Amino acid sequence: MQLTTREIDILQHTFLDYRSTEDFIQNPLVLHRAQGLYCWDTAGKRYFDAIGGVFVALLGHGHPRVMAAMREQMERMTFAPPLHGIADVTLDFVEKLGSVCPGDLRYVNPFSGGSEAVESAFKFARQYFKQSGHPGKYKFISRYSSYHGGTFGGMSASGTGERKAKFEPQMPGFLKVFPPTFYRDQFASWEEANRFAAQSVEDVIVAEGPETVAGFIVEPIGNTGGIITPTSEYFQLLRDICTRHNVLLIFDEVITGFAKTGHMFAAQTFGVTPDILCVGKGISSGAVPLGAMVAREDLAEAFRGSSADGKFFAHGHTFAGNPLACAVGIAVIDEILEKDLCAKAVRLGAYLARRLQDLQKLGIVREIRGKGILLGVELVRDTASMAPFPELGIALKRTALRNGLILRIDPTWFAVAPPLIAEESDLDEMCGLIEKSIREALDEARDECPNTHCSTVANRGR
Ligand SMILES: Cc1ncc(COP(=O)(O)O)c(C=O)c1O
């Protein structure tokens, strides 16, 4: 799309998330409206939103049920003052979200997004241990290649180097282990790499001293590392390790929550119940900012008592539990349950995985991974060398937008998570756009790539 002089001027007076304004101006996207599976830019060009914004619009944009719930709540009340009261609809949301969480995860704190949910989990865990006889437990372990938010705690737990190096030193007490992908070429099987990665968590806990470690936070499927999808055994091992050392297992389900992986939460997909769950993104299908932290009910016992005891959770945000957001959250959960969207994610996901497998004919796909409709495709220079091919991902960012397609693209992989209102025919349209964009990106990458071998790859499977 072409930016106006006014748009360029305004863009130069703001910051964009994790990217350079100058690069954005070269390959811009200024959106004006969105409906269902599509967004339109200011020039009226339509884009297939293959990622629901950014793993957010899981019911598509402007879902009628969500819009109706918002309108109804908007007429009644849009804000309740947190220090003096709580909205009735916030109580309904707490009950509703608690009712769909696994195990005895019933203690719900609504917030305005994923980072707030993650920060709250860290504060909750530290205060819990202080008030339950283990005041020395304060450290958190997380994984390299992870992303847990843009705030200081979330960033300190995140393992994406380039996003945090600028802000060092990070908060003390945050330690890292590698995800299973780091070890995959060092072991004969993926299962063994997963076992080793899980064992490394226990090794760090023991080396640090279990009496100092409060929690281990993990995305069940790691987006920033390229849709890292461990085995179920990995999570079972983590569950056992955390229980053994009285370390809270925190699942960051900001991306994986709400039906995408075939269950309400990826915790159920992998068959493991964490002690704390952090959610965001899809919980509002993108209509309003909403997130939540959900904790095991018995952990909340440590916070009971009168104000004079000072045991209450010393945490809050002005917009936490906002009535409008809570009305939306209830509508989204009801829609998932009534339309059985978890089952639909399994059915659509199987179809989508088969369609993405077709890309193998291009000879540049190392692996397709993920669960349900949350899938990632790892791109390589060729399947003989499995060498990374970052020029391809960079070119794909341009060609996808040119072809009216919104994906999550990294230089070495791309991800899709189409809204659950899609049908097979929509996925055909989406996969057609993906293949066209990859072929064009291969041509462009070949032009930029001095290695003539790239041109062979570009023509493969035509
Ligand atoms: C796994 C994960 N956790 C936390 C966050 C932070 O959420 P938010 O951007 O809503 O603050 C994100 C955002 O992308 C995320 O992907």
Image: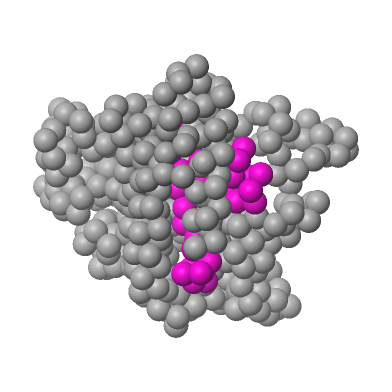
| Colour mapping used in the image | one colour
Furthest residue toward top: 450
Q: In percent of the image, x 88 and y 35: which residue is there?
A: 5
Q: In percent of the image, x 71 and y 31: which residue is there?
A: 26
Quadrant for residue 296, please give it.
Answer: bottom left
Q: In percent of the image, x 49 and y 56: which residue is there?
A: 431
Q: Position of residue 269 (x, y in %)?
A: 27, 62
Q: Position of residue 325 (x, y in %)?
A: 59, 66
Q: In percent of the image, x 15 and y 51: which residue is there?
A: 233
**Highlighted magenta segment, given as a residue range:** 398-427
**Residue 215 included in the magenta stretch of the image:** no
Relative to the observer, which residue lies in front, 80 or 312? 80
Compared to residue 308, the image places residue 147 above or below, namely above
Quadrant where the image shows the N terminus:
top right
- Using the rendered image of the protein, determine whether residue 183 is visible from the camera's viewpoint: yes
Relative to the observer, which residue lies in front, 391 or 41? 391
Relative to the observer, which residue lies in front, 217 or 186? 186
Quadrant for residue 303, please give it.
Answer: bottom left
Q: Position of residue 421 (x, y in %)?
A: 52, 71
Residue 416 horizontal side relative to residue 69, left or right: left
Relative to the observer, which residue lies in front, 413 or 173? 413
Q: Position of residue 66 (x, y in %)?
A: 60, 74
User: How many labels sit on residues?
Assistant: 0
Compared to residue 154, the image places residue 91 above or below, namely below
Furthest residue toward right: 6
- Using the rendered image of the protein, determine whether residue 152 is visible from the camera's viewpoint: no
Compared to residue 450, the image places residue 35 above or below, namely below
